[in-house]
Image: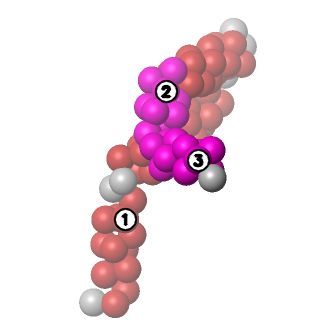
Amino acid sequence: MTSMTTLETLAAGLGTANVRTWLLDNVIPLVLLAVALLLLWLGGGKGDNAGVMRRLAGVVIALAIIGLAVSGAGVNVGQWIAGLFTG
């Protein structure tokens, strides 16, 4: 019984805050660097500046969605959009 109590105590202290912080500090900058290098490699060498800008627009939209999800402001945006239809 004491081992179960110890496990319950350890499980109560675990959370996702440290994993979230690690992802934001390490993984997202590496992904952004990889996307930037890929965009430069795909379009920069061929002179396809319009193609690079189209891809960049998609990346900017994806970054905006990630920013809303990470900051928690997505709830406010959702309430605002719902308010447009419900009055």
86 above or below 24? below
Q: Earlier in the sequence, mark 2 or mark 1?
A: 2
- Which percent across, then down, holds residue 48? 66, 22
Q: Earlier in the sequence, mark 3 or mark 2?
A: 3
9 or 31, which lies in front? Answer: 9
Q: Going 39% across and 69% down the picture, which residue do you hit?
A: 78
Q: The residue tagged with tag 2: helix, strand or loop?
A: helix
Q: Is residue 56 visible?
A: yes
79 or 15, which lies in front? Answer: 15
On the image, numbered disc 3 is attached to which residue? 2
Amino acid at pointer 3:
Thr
Tags 3 and 1 in contact by the CB under 8 Å rule?
no
Amino acid at pointer 2:
Trp
Distance, label 3 to label 2, CA atoms, is 33 Å
- The segment highlighted magenta reads 2-26
Is residue 10 shown in magenta? Answer: yes
- Which percent across, then down, holds residue 73? 33, 56
Distance, label 3 to label 1, CA atoms, is 42 Å
Distance, label 2 to label 1, CA atoms, is 23 Å
Q: Earlier in the sequence, mark 3 or mark 1?
A: 3
Is residue 6 shown in magenta? Answer: yes
57 above or below 74? above
66 above or below 86? above
73 or 59, which lies in front? Answer: 73
Q: Tell me the mark number nearer the camera, choosing from 3 and 1.
A: 3
On the image, numbered disc 1 is attached to which residue? 75
| Quadrant into which the C terminus falls | bottom left
On the image, numbered disc 2 is attached to which residue? 22
